[in-house]
Image: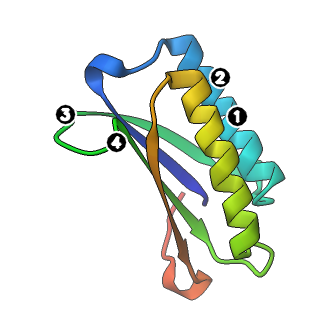
């Protein structure tokens, strides 16, 4: 953790190069701001059939840590929002979900 999942309409999915640049930026935000270990960062793109709302939707699932305060998460989301706009041209709804370590059961 953190896992960054970005849902975008299939027809608005950016080029491979832009997705690679966005994934790299997301990774840096997770390691720099959230202080996540590089091996624990996952960035996933999901092509979606858009129904209603913002053209992109982003879910970040992360482990709660004392350093990940509300103000830190605000900075993270603001910079993530900028990166998404820059690399996709889309406005995203961003939602972050923190989980306490004892509530996480994981493999690999």
Crowdedness of circle 1 by 10 Å Cα count: few (<14), some, many (20+)?
some
Q: Do the numbered discs 1 and 2 sit on residues whose CB atoms are within 8 Å?
A: yes
| Point 81% across, 59% down: residue | 35
First-in-chain label (2 vs 3): 2
**Element at badge 1?**
helix
The percent position of residue 60, horizontal first and vertical second, equals: 52, 57
Crowdedness of circle 3 by 10 Å Cα count: few (<14), some, many (20+)?
few
Mark 4 vs mark 2, foreground winner is 4
First-in-chain label (1 vs 4): 1
First-in-chain label (4 vs 2): 2
State the mark number for residue 54.
Answer: 4
Dividing the picture into quarters, in which one does residue 45 lie?
top left
> How is the protein colored in the picture?
rainbow
Horizontal side, residue 72 vs residue 6: left or right: right
**What residue is disc 2 on?**
21
**What residue is disc 1 on?**
25
**What residue is disc 3 on?**
49
| Point 68% across, 64% down: residue | 73
The percent position of residue 17, horizontal first and vertical second, equals: 58, 12
């Amino acid at each position: 953790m953190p896992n960054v999942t970005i849902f975008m309409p299939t027809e608005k999915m950016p080029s491979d190069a832009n997705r690679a640049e966005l994934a790299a930026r997301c990774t840096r935000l997770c390691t720099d701001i959230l202080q996540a270990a590089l091996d624990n960062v996952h960035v996933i793109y999901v092509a979606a059939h858009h129904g209603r709302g913002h053209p992109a939707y982003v879910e970040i699932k992360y482990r709660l840590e004392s350093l990940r305060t509300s103000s830190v998460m605000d900075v993270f989301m603001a910079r993530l929002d900028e990166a998404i706009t820059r690399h996709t041209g889309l406005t995203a709804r961003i939602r972050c979900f923190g989980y306490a370590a004892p509530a996480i059961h994981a493999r690999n």
